[in-house]
Amino acid sequence: MSATGYFTHRDCWKHEMGPGHPECPARLDAIEDRLLVSGVGDVLTRREAPLASLADLELGHDRLHVAAMQGLTEQLADDIEAGGPTHAMIDPDTALNIHTFHAALRAVGAVLAATDAVIAGEMENAFCSVRPPGHHACRSRAMGFCVFNSIAVAAKYALERHGLARVAVVDFDVHHGNGTEDILSGDERVLMVGFFQHPFYPYSGTQETAANMHNLPIPAYTKGAPIRELIDKYWIPLLEDFKPEMIFISAGFDAHREDDLGQLGLTEQDYAWITARLKNVAQRHAKGRIVSSLEGGYNLSALGRSVEAHLRVLADV
């Protein structure tokens, strides 16, 4: 079997939030281009992301939230037909176009399909190159560029649909994964560890909401070496003690030193190191099972290089 799956869908390119928005379709192009020129794409098993079912979405989201996003899309289509605006605003940073709902269903569907394939042993691990991202999406609210929370839904899916006993969620985006915390907080079958710049949007994560949530707030301008030390000191012992049967990664690459949306100082070598440490835990306790999904990362060159570094470790190339 090929070790690493790569899940995406062209619907994820159709979601856009207006000219100049950093969370744009070109992000996926940057990843595809980098995997092409580096040759890393040649060793991946490519799969098309299916649409997530509404029943699966409701593992992590209120039915009313899902219905609201669908209804907003239908209303937007009517407004456009009547000559109205092409986007509907959810918050000052987040908008829907008529393709957003389908793109978000593909994003969740990618992570669920990757979970199925990895648990079935068709591949050891997988990366989902999808958008919109998910980790700010709460149980009943879209926010922060995010509509549905792919990783939180997938963690619940692995537990409820596949009967796993323990899963870990790791979030290394520059922003706190408040939505994932909202959905998974208090579920003793889940261990969540993360680091993020603090103080910074969404201005949460410094208070432990439950015993299964472990956050590392990091001051702006911190570079890779001290972050590596914190991971070895805090994350790794927690993960070793928890012995997860699967690891899910909210893979945001906006903590890169070239990314203007944050002020942390990581490089692609740091992302490779973090991935290797997580892969080591997965190989000891989880049969190597990792599913990673794209979150942030807005400097296109840095994003492409960082995803390449992440995938080189996952795929052993």
Image: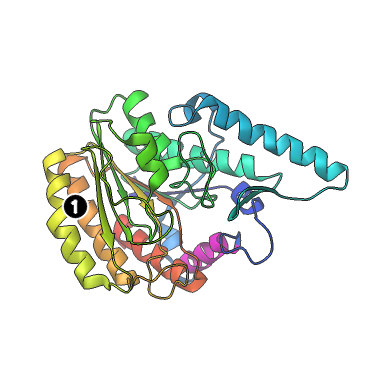
Q: Residue furthest right?
A: 82
Along the line of sight, the residue nearer the viewer: 249 or 262: 262
The N terminus lies in which quarter of the figure? top left
- Looking at numbered disc 1 in the image, what kind of residue is underneath it? Trp
The residue that appears at 83% across and 47% down in the rendered structure is: 84
Asked whether residue 2 is in view, the answer is no
Which stretch did the figure color magenta? 26-36
Q: Report which residue position mark 1 lands on.
A: 235
The residue that appears at 82% across and 45% down in the rendered structure is: 80
Q: Is residue 31 above or below residue 186?
A: below
The residue that appears at 25% across and 44% down in the rendered structure is: 208
Determine if the magenta segment contains residue 27. Answer: yes
Q: In this view, does 71 lie above or below 199?
A: above
The residue that appears at 38% across and 38% down in the rendered structure is: 182
Where is residue 88 drawn, in percent x and y?
A: 70, 47
Mark 1 Cα-neighbour bin, 10 Å: few <14, some 14–19, many ≥20:
many
